[in-house]
Amino acid sequence: MSRIRSAFVEFARAEEGNLAVIFAIAILPMLVAVGAAVDYSRASLARTQMQNALDSTALMLARDLASNVITTSQIPTKGPAYFSGLYTNKDAQNVSVTASYTQGSGTTKSTVLVTAKAQIKTDFMQVVGFPLMSFDASSTAVWGFNLLRVALVLDNTGSMNDYNKIGALKTAANNLVTQLSGLAQNNGDVMISVVPFEVEVNIGKSYKSATWLRWDLWDANNTNSWGGTYCSGGSWFTKAECLGHGYTWGDTQSTSDTSLWNGCVSDRDQSYDVSSTVPSSTATNFPADQERYCPVAALLPLTYNWSSVTSTINSMTANGATNQTIGLQWGWLSLLQQAPLNAPAEDPTKVYQHVIVLFTDGLNTADRWYGNGSSTSTQVDTRMKALCDAIKQTNTTIYTVQIDTDGAGQSAVLPYCASSAGNFYMLTNPNQIATAFAAIGTQISQLRVAK
């Protein structure tokens, strides 16, 4: 018994194994802490990937709605379907997704909300009683933040007849109108103007009494100038163009009956031809002219009367030479709350997005001063660049679309005028016009992830 008692005393006094005992006691919480970090890292990655997939899903749903690809009743089923194709994290299990649509009203914008939740099976936390780690995320796509005012500046020149480009343009422009008008929650949220152009713009005969028109360059007999009867230097020039090119106009005006005017106007005096200066004098007023190929479709000021917009587009025909500058200027003027077109007043408490979409199938060939109507005119391009510089200084986004079906080559000025490289579209086939306009419509729709 004394030996046993002595052995217990010696064991109690022993210190050689204390470090191992302390380590054994401490190792468990250390392992739990390290394991928890690993499990949390896996869950964090799974949630990040979930958030990215939700953001993409919300945008896809909103874009499809704006493009009329799906209806609001399809949102609850389309949302999970889109998400499942985007979310591929292998650790996530018990994944559930819901998608819903809320119609905007008044100042509240339309939204698509997509939410998801899931779990991962833990590798380490299950040791302390947490076999699963849960996480969730959501994303909201909101559109219509900005009220839209869009000017469609559309080429009506003679070459648009080739390959039925004019027909393809009508279809694409009408589709764009449908796409944009669908974003409006209230009348006036989206307004569109249409500016058909060739070497001049037809503003409409209803403006014949406007104080901002000038008549000193108008001749009702202009169409008889073909053959060189009246203009000493060109058989096709109008009076305004003949004098602008430095030639002599030989007709003596036999009438001042402005009811004979066909509605066309030529470029304003330089440098007002590339500015938005309010007309107030002869130099700043717009010259009434009598262009032989005056566009059949007259300019339509900003409106949300969609039948009028469609009617204007459908009435377009192809004739005449190319002066993109005058079309672009009138497109810009149609967005401004001033003479000559006096766009509707804007609510100062709301945000407006001003957009010009310029479509053309050729290069600049003539204006009031330069060009012969068939060859490319670098002088007209120079005027147009000055105009684009002026527009870019305002709150206006410019999209330019060129289609080249005859090998003329890319314009030197259209990419310059576009607000960014991505705002210029170079096409070679009429079938591409609808695709380009649809892409522009999507950009204009201003879709973005809000949450």
Image (cartoon, grey):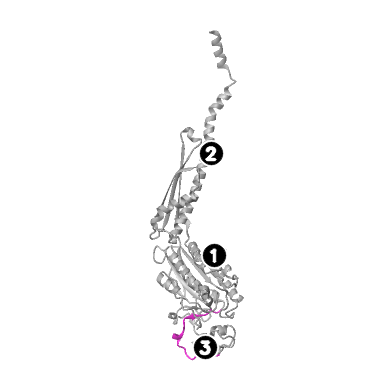
Q: Quadrant of residue 365?
A: bottom right
The verdict on residue 263 being magenta is: yes
Mark 2: which secondary structure? helix
Segment colored magenta: 250-269
Which residue position holds label 3? Answer: 224
- Whole-Å distance between the Cαs marked 1 and 3? 42 Å
Which residue position holds label 1? Answer: 423
- The x, y position of residue 11, in whole percent, is 56, 16
Q: Quadrant of residue 244?
A: bottom right
Which residue position holds label 2? Answer: 38
Q: Disc 1 vs disc 3: which is toward the camera?
A: 3
- Whole-Å distance between the Cαs marked 2 and 3? 87 Å
The verdict on residue 314 being magenta is: no
Instruction: Between residue 147 and residue 158, name the one nearer to us.
Output: 158
- The x, y position of residue 117, in whole percent, is 44, 45
Mark 3: which secondary structure? helix
- Whole-Å distance between the Cαs marked 1 and 2? 46 Å
